[in-house]
Image (spheres, rainbow, N blue to C red):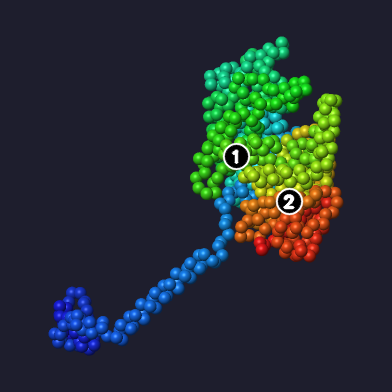
Amino acid sequence: MADKVDVNTPLNAKIAEELYFKAQFENGSEEPHVAISCGSGDDVSFTGLGKEELMKYADDPFWKKVRLILLIVFWIGWTIMLVAAIFIIVLAPKCPYRPDLKWYDKSIVYEIFPKSFQDSNPKAKKADTKTGDGVGDIRGIQDRLKYLMDVAKSKILYINSVYESKDEDRLAITNHVRIDPLFGTMEDFDMLRKVTKKLEMRLIMDFIPNHTGKLNEWFKKSQMKEGKYTDYYIWATCEPTDNTYPNNWMSVKGGRAWTYDDTRKACYFHQLESDKPDLNLRSADVRQELESILRFWLGRGVDGFHVQNAQYLYEDENLGDETLITGKTGDNYTDFEHNQTMNHPENLKILQGWKNVLESYNTKPGREKALIVTAKDDLNTTMKYFDAGVTIVRVTPLSDSNASFAESNVSLAESNASLAVSNASLAESNASLAENVSLAERMETKLKELISFNRIGLMYSDKDSSRLASRVDVNPEQIKALLTLQATLPGVPFNYYGNEIGMPDHPTLSAPNKYRTPMQWNFKGTEFSKNTPWLERNANYREVNVETEKGHQNDYSTLMVYKRLQELRENESFQWGTMSVYRDGDLLMYTRKADGFPGYLVAINLGTSKVTESFHAATGIPKEVKVVFHTHKDDNSAISLSDTSYILDPSHAVVFKYNSE
């Protein structure tokens, strides 16, 4: 057996050089183990170099030089790396700034009036069966999600009221947390939300806090003065037989805003029709009920709410008279300054409270909730809404009537002229002024006002106002230009169903149904429903429909132009770039530019004649540009604006792309 090594015996350098190891398993033991044999058994220890020996090397000129060289090399290398790091940080190009955009900053909102979008019911075997109602429903909306994603290019779905109601407007709510059987079931709604979540789509619903329907259980109990429900609505003593009412308030829809209730023997207040009594928001119980409604739908996955009639939420607590406009008779709603019943300061406070409710569901990025209101072309009120924390305020770049800015002011001037003969000269002067101020100039003023606000919702129409095609006298050329405006401005575009194909108002139906005709899916008029539609179709459905406008070699139909605009809007400068507005006669121009990304110039000819423009001189953009969009023709030319002037036809729009010089 090999000699054992004494582990306590140190080895000197000589022994280490001659050292070899031999391992073997020893037999005869209970457990095998390894024995190590060393080649020498000399007992010589190694204690290292002594101080005197080390000092010989330390003082040796050769080793001094080596150490000095190594030290110099180290510091030179360290200095080079430091300089290189500073150069990279300071002089190398930085990554462009990207803001933290929320879901409502990125996509266009597609607004649907459910009765008229898509009916999923099978063809009725008998005319009187419930299955053949010819009414759009929730399952129908789900069936059309592919169209919204792939063609309309929208990932935000806004559905008008589907709550249990007894009126065609769906605003006389009988229960805020039930789906009206006309549109389906709660299971249908939950399935729609499940599918939209899978598609990464957002869902916005109407929130209707100003009033309920007369058939609502709350109102029935308030009529009978049952407990807390006694003050759920605004009641006041009145004597209709003597024409004695609490005040001179008028309804937005015409007539007095007070209706006598024979059960309670008192008058109730209604801003809208008499079947929609206003809730008393000064009641803590009512406010709690409304908050519970929000929480119910938030719990089902709703991403945001559009507050209907936000301007009417509160009224003067003392029921004081409205101010009569001088020269008016007091017989119409427009005869008064609505200082007591519209845009009350308390509206902002309750909106802030609802926004706080929504914020409590914002648990992590991507789960933000949106609170949306619509303002009636009042910039002061718009600013107050934003101060209250509202996410989006919807406005229209056009006038609030069915005409353009210029046409609206002409009409107003003519109206003023008819009110009083003594003011005729002033009215004529105003009319002349309106005629002389171009639409482009009025648009310029409007855009310069809008760019000071964040998250403006840009809308042309909705279920209560004329469609875009009817606002511009059914001029398909100008429709495309105005769709260009909506898609490329800062803000959140809201598209009312059918505007993307140029659907107009119905020519013979009265308001509001003329704005709500069934969606025109194909030239046969059969795809909306297999049954007779609930409302007469627009007569032009054979020419204006999705199927025809998606057809082969129809690249410049209204729908295809709309689709390309939404794709163009995905570029960074249109998402968050700053805006500058210019005008040259009837040519409206504006730039969109985000730091670190290409800029874009949008030019729209709002006149009736061709315009020739160099653009560089008018806007100061770089001379080298490329056409990336045109409303009416295939044009992807690269242009040097110092050498070439661009010709733009009437009602045409073009977008140029440029890089910063």
**Where is residue 617 drawn, in percent x and y?**
75, 58
In which quadrant is the C terminus drawn? bottom right
**Where is residue 50 drawn, in percent x and y?**
19, 81
**Where is residue 186 drawn, in percent x and y?**
60, 38
Badge 2 marks a residue whose secondary structure is: strand
Q: Which residue, given by chain and number where applicable, does mark 1 sit on?
A: 386
Whichever of labels 2 and 1 marks the residue nearer the N terminus, that label is 1
The residue located at (75%, 23%) in the rendering is 326
Badge 1 marks a residue whose secondary structure is: helix
Work out whether 178 lies above or below 11: above
Does residue 346 appear to the left or right of 589 in the view shown?
A: left
Which of the numbered marks, if any, corresponds to residue 175? none
Determine the image quadrant of residue 495. top right
* Cα–Cα span, label 2 and label 1: 27 Å
| Residue type of the residue flagged with mark 2 | Tyr
The residue located at (52%, 41%) in the rendering is 359
Q: Which residue, given by chain and number where applicable, does mark 2 sit on?
A: 582
Front tag of 2 and 1: 2
Determine the image quadrant of residue 433. top right
Work out whether 278 lies above or below 531: above
Q: Residue furthest left?
A: 43
The residue located at (13%, 85%) in the rendering is 43
Comparing 460 with 440, the one in front is 440
Does the residue at mark 2 contact the one at mark 1 (Cβ under 8 Å)?
A: no
Determine the image quadrant of residue 293. top right
Crowd class of label 1 (few under 14; some 14 to 19; many from 20; radius 10 Å): some
